[in-house]
């Protein structure tokens, strides 16, 4: 057990009241105590050492759909006490979240136990949820569609969309999903992360018990992802971001947030990863031109703005129980030593010269 | 020819400001609610474009000044609903004076720089967006004089109410606000000119959104809680009536929700379903209505407790499921800026205080029979629209 001491990197960001526990089977339990009207408990299942392949992309998304419904009456029980249950799938993880009044935290234990026991993959469930996923994809916004195009343009076959396609998910068999589920629930791929009004010792002890039966494992090497192109369309650019654990990653983020800081009605989409990823930066204002901004603006100002906005991004993510449980848990699922403070510090130390490399790249694709 | 809209002559006055000091916040939120007159669909379009241009620059504040005044990482919160505009911003506590001044400048005198007024359309399309819209939009060509005329016509002191919340001394914002009130244009335009023909509308290739709209409903502090409870029961979560019927039984929808929304015809209770072309035949819609009704008639105490639990979630536990579509574009979250906005909206538009606790008590006092009666009435009397 490694209690995290108060860690302060600046005047506005602190890590305190946090407890991280690494179990001998490789899994991690993280909890943060703070006053809040609810607690967010998240089960994060990492696939960092077995990325999606062309033969199975979308399968994890399908599992998420099926598993989230595999415990009869679970949603009813949670919602009846004033809580809610969420599930999502990213490129490097699958996440289940229980947002609950503190006194009902036991429902999250019940849910985690149920999920770890069985993901519920059957022919009927696959058929039902394949249709749902197909409809979900039909509801994609143009931003989401552009994001898929950007990943595909920049990373080629390694930029596969975790949502899958109707064709890719409908080919799945129960045994395929069970195989993936087994890998996802091996010790080193499991993180339970929580934040809110919580008894840290009691929570950790309960989670230890929940995780006691899972298979011990050590994380495998992280697969790379080679840049294969670039992407920029009017109103939208994709900024390649190296591993978030590196200084280069922090510098690239500064450039992405710097650009967003100069756009009217901006958006930035980025999920921390140890693999090279993308920050998608754009504007929902039809009058905005990214090219004009990159041509006209002084990079030194963008650099300053980028650092401020990137630091604010971290503070903002950590400002809610669900945001903190998600950010801390995601980083731990990437690497047991990766903490928000480390990313924060790297951003604070970002240098203009390194920032400029990404800025020039953005200028090259802006339209 | 697009009809123009006559404005009533209004006496010039000072827009009211309401203070909510809160020393625990590390920022100051400023929210303006602007009541809207009846507007046609083209004027709605011009107004939607005007909003994003108005906050870019004023004679007093250039683009960079605007960014400097807003709290780092934040932007103007802009929204056009059927009955009002939301214009909101957040500043650091020491900047509440410049924040109020910026708000005043945007309301009274945006630059509307000619170069920024181009006939360009957002490339962002969200297939679900029509479900959350309470008015029709018709694209038109844009001209600066139309934009200025529309803006000046709407931005009358009588239509505007500003709220401020955060760390400041009581009365200080009001004093500053009163000191800024010399710039209101006292010449009231007699009409909103809009003389350009509409552009041809592009038909998006997106799944149809099926909407059941109730007749206009009366929103008051005594009815709101029960309507919210009905929305919980019909359209929130994986045990709701809409989910069980449309997704599970009829397999016709991935996303379905129930919520309250202001529309040009008043507030309505809306049930929305994302579906496909095969599921919008009259017989399918009739079957959907029949099954929704049957499920509603079979509501039990367990279902009522579930619906009350959902209400507890967003009214006391800050779950982001409040089934009401207002100025955040989607269903409201527990954000402090949004809380100020919603509080100020109901005070300005309906003259009652938003009181989560009292709404929750209303929910708890509802019986199964009450809920059944309201939900079946909504289903029976709703008009169907397809977007």
Image (cartoon, rainbow, N blue to C red):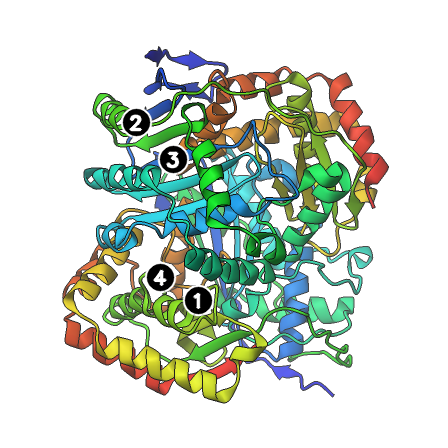
Any mark on residue A213, and which? 2
**Label 1 chain ID:** B
Any mark on residue B256, and which? 1
Location of the C terminus of chain B by quadrant is bottom right
Q: Is residue B381 above or below residue A268?
A: below
C-alpha distance separating marks 4 and 2: 35 Å
Tag 3 secondary structure:
strand
Q: Crowding at label 1, few (<14), some or many (≥20) Cα neighbours within 10 Å?
A: many
Any mark on residue A76, and which? none
Residue A5 horizontal side relative to residue B326, left or right: left
Mark 1 vs mark 3: same chain? no
Mark 3 vs mark 2: same chain? yes
C-alpha distance separating marks 4 and 1: 8 Å
Mark 2 vs mark 1: same chain? no
Residue on which the image places disc 4: B236
Query: x and y percent of residue B141 in the render?
Result: 78, 72
Q: Check whether the beta carbons of the residues at disc 1 and disc 3 lie within 8 A of each other.
A: no
Residue B313 horizontal side relative to residue A177, left or right: left
Residue on which the image places disc 3: A43
Which of marks 1 and 4 precedes in the sequence? 4
Q: Quadrant of residue A21?
A: top left
Tag 4 secondary structure:
loop
């Amino acid at each position: 057990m490694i209690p995290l001491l108060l860690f302060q990197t600046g005047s506005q960001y602190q890590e305190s009241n946090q407890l991280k526990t690494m179990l001998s089977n490789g899994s991690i339990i993280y909890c943060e105590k703070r006053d809040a009207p609810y607690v967010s408990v998240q089960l994060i299942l990492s696939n960092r050492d077995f990325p999606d392949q062309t033969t199975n992309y979308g399968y994890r998304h399908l599992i998420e759909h099926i598993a989230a419904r595999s415990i009869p009456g679970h949603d009813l029980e949670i919602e009846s006490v004033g809580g809610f249950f969420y599930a999502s799938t990213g490129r490097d993880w699958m996440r289940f979240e229980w947002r609950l009044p503190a006194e009902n935290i036991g429902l999250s234990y019940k849910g985690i136990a149920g999920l770890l026991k069985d993901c519920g993959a059957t022919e009927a469930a696959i058929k039902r949820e394949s249709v749902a996923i197909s409809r979900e994809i039909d509801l994609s916004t143009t931003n989401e569609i552009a994001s898929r195009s950007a990943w595909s343009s920049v990373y080629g076959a390694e930029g596969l969309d975790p949502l899958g396609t109707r064709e890719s998910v409908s080919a799945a068999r129960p045994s395929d999903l069970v195989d993936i589920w087994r890998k996802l629930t091996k010790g080193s791929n499991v993180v339970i992360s929580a934040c809110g009004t919580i008894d840290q010792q009691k929570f950790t002890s309960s989670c230890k018990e929940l995780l006691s039966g899972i298979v011990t494992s050590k994380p495998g090497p992280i697969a790379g992802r080679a840049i294969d192109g670039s992407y920029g369309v009017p109103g939208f650019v994709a900024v390649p971001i190296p591993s978030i654990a590196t200084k280069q990653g922090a510098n690239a983020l500064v450039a992405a947030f710097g650009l967003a800081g100069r756009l009217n009605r901006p958006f930035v989409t980025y999920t921390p990863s140890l693999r090279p990823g993308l920050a998608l930066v754009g504007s929902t204002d039809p009058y905005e031109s990214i090219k004009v901004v990159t041509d006209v603006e002084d990079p030194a100002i963008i650099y300053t703005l980028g650092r401020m906005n990137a630091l604010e991004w971290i503070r903002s993510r950590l400002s809610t129980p669900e945001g903190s449980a998600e950010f801390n848990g995601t980083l731990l699922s990437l690497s047991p030593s990766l903490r928000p403070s480390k990313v924060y510090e790297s951003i604070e130390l970002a240098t203009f010269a390194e920032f400029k490399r990404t800025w020039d790249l953005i200028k090259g694709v802006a339209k | 020819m697009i009809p123009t809209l006559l404005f009533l002559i209004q006496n010039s006055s000072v827009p009211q400001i309401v203070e909510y000091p809160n020393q625990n916040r590390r920022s100051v939120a400023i929210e303006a609610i602007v009541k809207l007159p009846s507007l046609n669909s083209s004027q709605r379009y011009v107004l939607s474009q005007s909003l994003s241009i108005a906050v870019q620059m004023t004679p007093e504040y250039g683009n960079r000044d605007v960014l400097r005044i807003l709290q780092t990482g934040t932007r103007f919160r802009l929204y056009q609903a059927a009955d009002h505009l939301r214009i909101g911003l957040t500043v650091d506590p020491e900047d509440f004076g410049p924040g109020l001044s910026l708000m005043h400048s945007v309301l009274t005198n945006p630059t509307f720089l000619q170069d920024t007024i181009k006939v360009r359309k957002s490339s962002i399309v969200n297939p679900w967006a029509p479900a959350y819209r309470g008015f029709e939009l018709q694209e038109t060509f844009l001209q600066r004089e139309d934009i200025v005329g529309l803006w000046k016509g709407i931005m009358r002191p009588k239509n505007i109410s500003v709220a401020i919340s955060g760390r400041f001394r009581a009365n200080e914002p009001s004093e500053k606000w009163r000191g800024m009130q010399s710039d209101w244009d006292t010449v009231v335009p007699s009409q909103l000119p809009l003389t350009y023909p509409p552009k041809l509308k592009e038909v998006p290739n997106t799944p149809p959104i099926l909407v059941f709209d109730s007749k206009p409903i009366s929103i008051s502090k005594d009815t709101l809680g029960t309507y919210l409870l009905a929305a919980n029961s019909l359209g929130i979560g994986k045990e709701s009536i809409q989910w069980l019927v449309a997704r599970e039984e009829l397999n016709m929808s991935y996303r379905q929700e129930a919520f309250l929304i202001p529309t040009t015809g008043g507030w309505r209770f809306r049930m929305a379903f994302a579906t496909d072309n095969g599921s919008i035949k009259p017989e399918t819609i009739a079957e959907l209505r029949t099954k929704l009704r049957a499920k509603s008639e079979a509501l039990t105490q367990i279902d009522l407790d579930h619906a009350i639990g959902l209400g507890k979630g967003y009214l006391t536990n800050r779950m982001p499921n409040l089934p009401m579509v207002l100025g955040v574009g989607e269903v409201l979250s527990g954000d402090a800026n949004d809380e100020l906005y919603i509080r100020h909206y109901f005070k300005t538009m309906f003259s009652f205080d938003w009181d989560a606790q009292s709404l929750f008590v209303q929910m708890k006092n509802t019986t199964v029979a009450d809920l059944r009666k309201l939900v079946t009435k909504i289903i029976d009397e709703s008009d169907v629209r397809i977007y």
